[in-house]
Image (cartoon, helix red, strand yellow):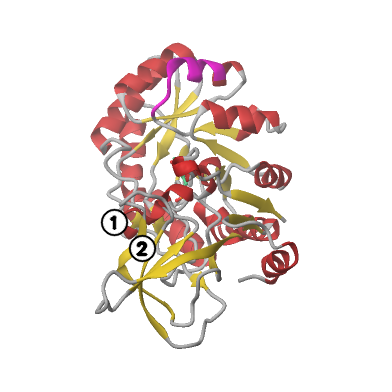
Amino acid sequence: MNEKISRFLAESEPETPCLVIDLDVIRDNFLALREALPLARIFYAVKANPATPILALLRDLGACFDAASIFEIRDCMALGIGADRLSFGSTIKKRRHIAEAYEQGVRLFAFDSAAELDKLALAAPGARVFCRIFMEGAGADWPLSKKFGCDVEMARDLLIDAAGRGLVPYGVSFHVGSQQRDLGQWDVACARTALIFTALRARGIELKMVNIGGGFPARYRQEIPGATDYGHAIMAAVTRHFGNNLPEIIAEPGRGIAGDAGVIQTEVVLISKKSYGDQRRWVYLDIGKFGGLAETMDEAIKYRLRTPHDGGPEGPVVLAGPTCDEVDVLYDKANYHLPLALAVGDKVEILSAGAYTTTYCSVGFNGYPPLKEHYI
Ligand SMILES: *Cc1c(COP(=O)(O)O)cnc(C)c1O
């Protein structure tokens, strides 16, 4: 755990559970990605953590922003972020929300279907639109497959159609899946994207932009490559498939910027066994799936944990949240071990928890208040 966060926790003894974000790490992560991808414009995926201190910091560093809803667009604009730095990246938008964004000056929109293109043609005439293509999410711990994107053939036709309907067919986007640990996935995606560029060129339409999405990882239990490895793999993929005629590149990191910047401090509420012969202890924390740890669904994201007894003898545990709901179990199959000395009242830290936590918190499920947040 980083020293700045440790010191804050020791000195302020905040009420738990709480998330503490070190804004210096947000800055470092942003700068590292920008350095790893010097040819790309970085659009921070606001949904990963939309806290005002993060948005303001990234605004001042010159970032652009990928918004998942009109509400995120409003939040960004309220902070003085210009419409020219915003992309409305959701493929599922109400027509009146498209119209509002357009009135506010937003000119960059995603789509992946004919019906969404209809809405854009009506509500955002002349806007630049990009079509999201389907990716399987192989290699990703939190895949974004099935629900998003269309196949290459359909994307080609929709982009051609966009040109005939007063929109600017601007490019192609994809998302290789969140927490993507396979660097080869960008190559697969760029190959598909290049096919569409070629097909459109044959129709006299020059696409300009490749949106390489997110997928940049945070450090959970498994080791991950560094930002520069991602940069090299992505630039190699783009170069392989586009040659010297490089398109404009956009990246949309969310987790890769916010994840490692945050620590959630929790408290052990109960340690128990279900029978005398039970080999595993049940450890109940004051945070669970409904307190912000929704990405433990299917045990997909495996957070690293710190306890005051690390280094001592350990035993296997089932880790669970505090609510009266059967599904509020964090890890049962993922083979977590915690120190035998762990006791009720101990503080346990959940590392790299800065992304996709605060906003996943329920609105008072079982009466628990939302996850507290500290930005230092
Ligand atoms: C969620 C999302 C992102 C961010 O993904 P990460 O894996 O967190 O980087 C980027 N682009 C789009 C369109 C998204 O929906």
The 10 Å Cα crowd at callout 1, few under 14, some 14 to 19, many 20 or more, is some
Say if residue 248 shows up in the picture.
Answer: no
Q: Is mark 1 within 8 Å of ligand 1?
A: no
Extreme-front residue of the structure: 276
Vertical order, 236 against 113 (above or below):
below
Q: Which portion, as a residue range, is magenta?
A: 92-100
Q: Mark 1 and mark 2 in contact? Answer it, CB < 8 Å.
A: yes
Residue 93 in the image, given as x and y percentages of width and height: 42, 24
Point out which mark residue 138 bears. Answer: 1
Q: Kindly identify which residue carries mark 2.
A: 182
97 is within the stretch colored magenta: yes
Q: Quadrant of the N terminus?
A: bottom right
Name the quadrant of the C terminus.
Answer: bottom right
227 or 178, which is in the foreground?
178
- Tell me which residue sits at (49%, 77%) in the image: 342
- Residue 263 appears left or right of 9: left
> In the image, is 314 to the left or to the right of 115?
right
Q: What kind of residue is marked 2?
A: Asp
Residue 339 percent across, percent down from the top left: 45, 81
Determine the residue positioned at 53% across, 62% down: 352
Residue type for callout 1: Ala
Q: Give percent across and percent down for residue 187.
A: 35, 56
Camera-nearest residue between 15 and 239: 15
